[in-house]
Amino acid sequence: SSPPVVASAPTSGAILPLAVNTIEPTSEDILLGRGKPVQTHPGNIRFREWLEEYRDEYERTPRHKKRLIAAEMTSILSSNGVRFLKQGPDKKSWVAIDSKEAEEK
């Protein structure tokens, strides 16, 4: 019998991509990014409508407390199963971001 075939490591100095936990966005998710596909995503449309309800309160809030409002809103959405997703490194997949990153957006 012939010896087993063993794959060798790339010798060209190529860097292999890291595995990323990709997510299939649902209509509930909020997609971060630009362009019509993001703007017209059902979760983003609902998010903008929801934010509009709180716009006056947010604008009247002192600057040092606005971060607390953002954290509370992110928490409410997350507890209702909404995920904040951004495009993966390949620009074709979606990955979840943590609550701190979502608050900043």
Image (cartoon, helix red, strand yellow):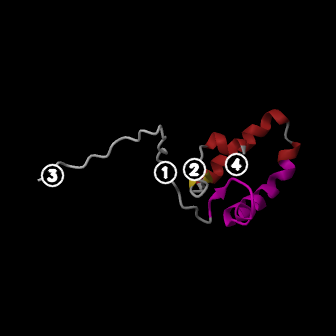
Which residue corresponds to the image point at 56% horizontal and 51% vertical from the top-left?
Answer: 95
Which residue corresponds to the image point at 77% horizontal and 59% vertical from the top-left?
Answer: 48
**For the residue labelled by badge 3, is the local secondary structure a helix, a strand or a loop?**
loop
Q: Nearer the viewer, mark 1 or mark 3?
A: 3
Q: Which mark is residue 96?
A: 2
Mark closer to the chain start, 4 or 2: 4
Q: Residues within 10 Å of mark 2 (few under 14, many from 20)?
A: many
Left or right of 82, for residue 18:
left
Q: Which residue is mark 3?
A: 2
The part of the chain drawn in magenta is: 28-57
Q: Nearer the viewer, mark 3 or mark 4?
A: 3
Q: CA distance from mark 1 to mark 3?
A: 38 Å
Q: Residues within 10 Å of mark 4 (few under 14, many from 20)?
A: some
* Whole-percent x, y for residue 39 in the image: 74, 62
Q: Nearer the viewer, mark 1 or mark 4?
A: 1
Q: CA distance from mark 1 to mark 4?
A: 25 Å
